[in-house]
Image: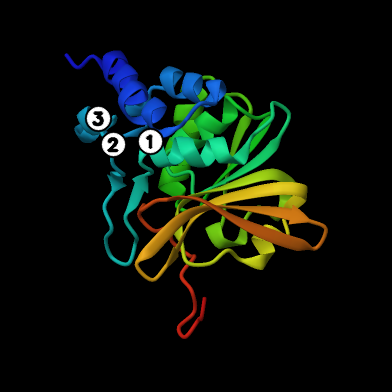
């Protein structure tokens, strides 16, 4: 029988703490959350590897979906500097692991997923784990969730080529958005911050994660 608690501790000690994740709340949340529950049963033994984890293969025009590499997720969430009363939007929550993590750090989380099957799985798992402050909603990822805006923070669960202005507009004054932004062969985790009608971008670390569907730059787009 697999000792998932031991694997979880090894993940935190060998992937999270050693990569400059010092936020006690992020570390504690990753120690508490059973990541294996958010992974298809046939792949649960891989749940704590230091890699992006395929949770649904692509087929018939449907994109593959992944759980983000634990270290990248932890560092990106840490960079958002969440507060206990923050209102957060999690874009592309898939089976709900990132939403559950955010739920341990923020006051209210809206977990957006466009795939009905993944959204249903996320709702079931979050209910089973008694994560009461996360609400799963369904809709196009690139549209965000304006019905509950504005947000203190927005997290994008995958690599993107652009950040839609309509999504940035869903941030509160002083709000932050965290995403891995790709430009050519390079990708960097970046924090965007709102000041009035303006948005600043601050690269925080290099990262390579699978793409989040719906955020490809238009053909001919120049960075």
Q: Residue at the spot x=42%, y=39% of the render? A: 95
Taking the image as drawn, is residue 29 in sight? yes
Q: Residue at the spot x=27%, y=20% of the render? A: 7
- Please tell me which residue lies in front, 78 or 144: 78
Indicate the secondary structure of the residue bearing disc 1.
helix
Q: How crowded is mark 1: few (under 14 residues within 10 Å), some or many (20 or more)?
A: many
Q: Are marks 2 and 1 in contact (CB under 8 Å)?
A: yes
Q: Earlier in the sequence, mark 2 or mark 3?
A: 3
x, y percent for residue 99: 52, 35
Q: Earlier in the sequence, mark 2 or mark 1?
A: 2
Question: Closer to us: mark 1 or mark 3?
Answer: 1
Q: In which quarter of the image is residue 5?
A: top left
Q: Which mark is residue 70?
A: 1
Indicate the secondary structure of the residue bearing disc 3.
helix
Indicate the secondary structure of the residue bearing disc 2.
loop
Q: According to the image, label 3 marks what residue?
A: 44
Q: Residue at the spot x=45%, y=83% of the render? A: 219
x, y percent for residue 101: 51, 30
Q: Left or right: where does residue 79 sit relative to residue 67?
A: right
Q: According to the image, label 2 marks what residue?
A: 50
């Amino acid at each position: 029988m697999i000792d998932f608690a031991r694997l979880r501790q090894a993940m935190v000690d060998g992937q999270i703490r050693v990569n400059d994740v010092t936020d006690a709340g992020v570390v504690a949340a990753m120690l508490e959350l059973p990541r294996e529950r958010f992974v298809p049963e046939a792949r649960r033994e891989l749940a704590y590897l230091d890699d992006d984890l395929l949770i649904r293969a692509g087929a018939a025009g449907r994109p593959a979906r992944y759980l983000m590499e634990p270290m990248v997720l932890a560092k990106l969430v840490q960079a958002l500097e969440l507060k206990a009363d923050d209102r957060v939007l999690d874009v592309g929550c898939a089976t709900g692991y990132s939403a559950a993590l955010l739920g341990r750090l923020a006051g209210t989380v809206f977990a957006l997923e466009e795939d009905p099957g993944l959204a249903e799985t996320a709702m079931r798992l979050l209910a089973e784990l008694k994560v009461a402050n996360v609400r799963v909603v369904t809709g196009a990822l690139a549209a965000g969730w304006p019905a509950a805006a504005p947000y203190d923070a927005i997290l994008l669960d995958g690599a993107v080529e652009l950040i839609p202005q309509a999504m940035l507009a869903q941030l509160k004054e002083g709000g932050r958005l965290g995403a891995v932004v790709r430009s050519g062969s390079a990708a960097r985790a970046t924090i965007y911050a709102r000041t009035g009608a303006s948005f600043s971008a601050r690269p925080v670390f290099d990262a390579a994660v699978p793409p989040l569907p719906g955020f490809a730059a238009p053909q001919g787009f120049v960075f």
